[in-house]
Each structure stands twice: as C-alpha cells, then as structure tokens.
Image (tube, helix red, strand yellow):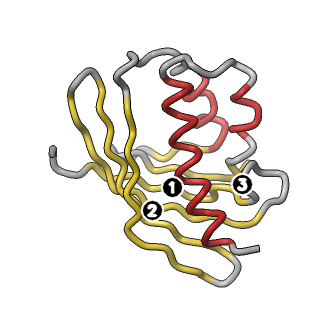
Amino acid sequence: MDILAAARAEVINRHAFFVGWFTGKLPESAMEDSARAFATDMQMIVPDGQMIGAAEVVTMLRSARSKRGPDFAIRVEMREARLLGDAALIVYDEHQVIEGAKTARRSSALFTADPAAPEGVVWRHLQETWLPNE
C-alpha cells in the first residue's frame, strides 16, 4: 500500500464529505463510514489551541449536519507529504467559503494504515492553524 497516496486521498475525500455533510446533501448514515477514518485515540488541536479527541470530533461533526448553506465550499491545497516510518504526514491548506466569507487554515495531519478505514488510513493527529484572511 502506498500510504502517502492513501493519506492524500483521505484528506481530499474527507473534505468532500464535510461539504456534503455540512450542507445536508449526505444522509445521516454517511457518518458511520466517515467516523471510521478517525483512530479512536486521535487527537485534534483546533485553531484556538483546544485539544479534542476522536469522540469529540465525531460529536462535533454529527451536530454540524445541514448547518451550512448551499454556497459552502472547501478547497484543499496540498503543501507537503512525508513518509515517517510507517506513518504519513500531510500538510495542507484548507480554504473555506461560508456565506461569501473566506477563511483559511493550515493543517498538519498524521496518518497510519488501517484496512477498515474508508481510504485505508486513519487520522492519528491533526493540528489546525488559522491563516490570514485571503
């Protein structure tokens, strides 16, 4: 398995899921498959510095279903991909449009292989940092 390719695909496909989920275009059942992309011991550091675990991430996602309008969009720009032993580190910029307002954040995500996950890898760690407004 090419873990770097799988991790890149995971980043792209998970953000496509977020758009469909946040705009209500995906059924509630889609969350079950998506939740398998997060390792049970995953940690996420959100842009304000708060650290949350996988269960909190999934709870936050569940509550955000259909909370965005039809113009909501996410564009992902890959910055770097590195192999770290049996893990992949992906750095990417995430650009969002919410009701015409643009935001951007840089994220670094660590992935390990898991054949039960949608793309064959799970998110182990994610840190997001706000970027200046576009």
Looking at the image, which is closer to me, 87 or 16?
A: 16
Q: Is disc 2 in contact with disc 1, using a CB cutoff of under 8 Å?
A: yes
Q: Position of residue 75 (x, y in %)?
A: 37, 45
Q: Is residue 124 above or below residue 27?
A: below
Label of residue 119 in the image: 3
For the point 54% across and 53% down, the residue is 11
x and y percent of residue 109 in the render? 52, 61
Type of residue at label 2? Ser
Question: From mark 3 to mark 1, how far is it between C-alphas?
Answer: 17 Å
Task: Give the residue pinned by disc 2.
Answer: 108
Residue under label 1, please give it: 126
Quote the CA–CA distance across marks 3 and 2: 18 Å
Identify the element where label 2 is drawn: strand
Q: Quadrant of residue 102?
A: top left
Tell me which residue sits at (76%, 31%) in the image: 32
Q: Is residue 47 left or right of residue 100?
A: right
**Mark 1 is on which residue type?**
Leu
Badge 1 marks a residue whose secondary structure is strand
Which is nearer the N-term, disc 3 or disc 2? 2
Determine the residue positioned at 74% across, 48% down.
118
Badge 2: residue crowd in 10 Å (few <14, some 14–19, many ≥20): some
